[in-house]
Image: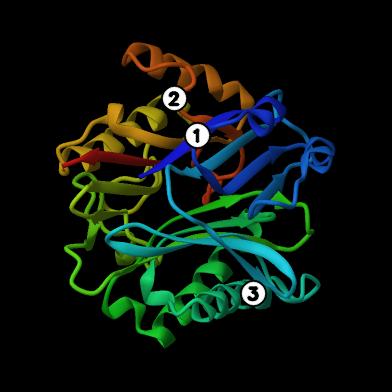
């Protein structure tokens, strides 16, 4: 099983943890991120012009035991390969376009092609991807173009005919200055292993594929040890695909959390099974509504990393992603 270490930037980066670190993500002002970068772990370094009054944060992913092999692409450390008794895994972080000066849509296509090339170099392909993260600079200006690029890539690779990964798409700049930077986790079961994966429906929402947004609401991986659920970035979207509770952050947070909990309940899980979470908050003044929701539901203030960022629609004010696990 994977474990996580979360917190403010420098204490988290300096803290020791049991296991082997396989990836990290840092988020803050350009100045904070520039002073914190380290090159010994595959990393995703995200930044916005201002912090929004929130501290810079870091999230680190650890493998409890075993060996990790580094993955390089064009001379840069971009991933970790590891295994357990049941499957081989690849975790990629910080994969972007080949040409960060190209038009945005071209950069997005290059990022997907680079993800695929790195996976192929490890004996994987894009069909093995369980989850992706897509961070786009000025997302609200070109999210539709990103979706067209992703649709075309998935169509050409036959992804729509099988497993469509869970995903998060969020507005954030990055330290390379490119229009997009990505991360992904892929899994390939070992021969004869009792390992399954499945796309999960959202009881309170239609499939994102119904309105041509190419991700599954959540994905589940089951092994003899237990199961892991990856809940995609989830926001206040009604069953028909429209934004619900426009202009009301409190109600948007409540609906988002109802949706997330309903997904988990289909797998006999609750929010207390969460192992990693990020709350994307459009404006800092909405944070008290989020903290109130946590307090009202008996969850700690530190339940999720809190990031000021744009969601994929300008009228969406909050988004949550999380992973949850339970041993069998």
Q: CA distance from mark 2 to mark 1?
A: 21 Å
CA gap, disc 3 to disc 1?
41 Å
The residue carrying mark 1 is: 18
121 w.r.t. 213: above or below: below
Residue at horizontal 72 percent and vertical 29 percent from the top: 10
Q: Residues within 10 Å of mark 2 (few under 14, many from 20)?
A: some
Q: Earlier in the sequence, mark 3 or mark 1?
A: 1
Q: Residue at x 32, y 66 (%)?
A: 209
**Residue 296 in the image: above or below residue 230:** above
Query: In the rendered view, how is the structure colored?
Result: rainbow
- Labels 2 and 1 touching (C-beta < 8 A): no
Query: Which residue is the site of mark 3?
Result: 105
Task: Give the SS element for disc 2.
Answer: loop
Q: Which mark is residue 303?
A: 2
Sooner in the amino-acid sequence: mark 3 or mark 2: 3
User: Residues under labels 3 and 2: Cα distance?
Assistant: 35 Å
Residue at the image position 49 percent from the left and 43 percent from the top: 62
Residue 278, labelled with which disc?
Answer: none
- In the displayed structure image, the side of residue 57 where residue 317 appears, left or right: left
**Quarter of the image holding residue 268?**
top left
Q: Residue 87: give x, y in percent of width and height.
A: 32, 64
Closest to the observer, 212 or 192: 192
User: Furthest-front residue in view?
Assistant: 66
Return the x and y of residue 263 as percentages of the image width and height.
23, 43
Residue 40 image point, x, y percent = 70, 51
- The residue lying toward the viewer, choosing from 234 and 278, is 278
Q: Please state which of the two labelled residues, at mark 3 or mark 2, is closer to the viewer.
A: 2
Q: Quadrant of the C terminus?
A: top left
Q: Earlier in the sequence, mark 2 or mark 1?
A: 1
| In front: label 3 or label 1 | 1
Report x, y in % for residue 46. Answer: 69, 47
Q: Which residue corresponds to the image point at 38% horizontal and 40% vertical from the top-left?
A: 236
């Amino acid at each position: 099983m994977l474990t996580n270490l979360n917190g403010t930037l420098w204490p988290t980066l300096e803290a020791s943890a049991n296991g082997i670190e396989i990836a990290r993500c840092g988020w803050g002002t350009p100045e904070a991120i520039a002073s914190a970068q380290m090159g010994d772990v595959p990393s995703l370094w995200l930044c916005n012009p201002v912090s929004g009054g929130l501290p810079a944060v870091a999230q680190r992913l650890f493998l409890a035991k075993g060996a990790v092999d580094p993955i390089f692409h064009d001379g840069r450390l971009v991933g970790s390969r590891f295994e357990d008794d049941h499957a081989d895994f690849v975790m990629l972080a910080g994969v972007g376009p080949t040409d960060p000066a190209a038009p945005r849509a071209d950069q997005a296509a290059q990022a997907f092609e680079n993800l695929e090339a790195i996976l192929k170099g490890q004996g994987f392909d894009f069909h093995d991807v369980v989850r992706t993260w897509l961070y786009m600079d000025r997302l609200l200006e070109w999210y539709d173009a990103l979706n067209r690029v992703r649709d075309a890539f998935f169509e050409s690779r036959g992804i729509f005919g099988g497993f469509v990964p869970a995903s998060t798409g969020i507005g954030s700049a990055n330290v390379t200055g490119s229009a997009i930077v990505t991360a992904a986790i892929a899994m390939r079961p070992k021969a004869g292993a009792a390992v399954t994966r499945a796309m999960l429906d959202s009881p309170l929402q239609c499939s994102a594929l119904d309105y041509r947004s190419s991700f599954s609401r959540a994905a589940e991986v089951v092994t003899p040890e237990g199961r892991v659920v990856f809940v995609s970035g989830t926001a206040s979207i009604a069953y028909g695909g429209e934004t619900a509770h426009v202009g009301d952050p409190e109600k948007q947070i409540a609906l988002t959390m109802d949706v997330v909990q309903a997904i988990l309940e289909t797998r006999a899980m609750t929010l207390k099974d969460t192992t990693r979470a990020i709350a994307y908050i459009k404006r800092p003044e909405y944070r008290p509504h989020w903290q109130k929701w946590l307090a009202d539901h008996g969850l700690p203030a530190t339940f999720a990393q809190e990031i000021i960022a744009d969601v994929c629609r300008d009228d969406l004010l909050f988004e949550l992603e999380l992973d949850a696990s339970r041993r069998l």
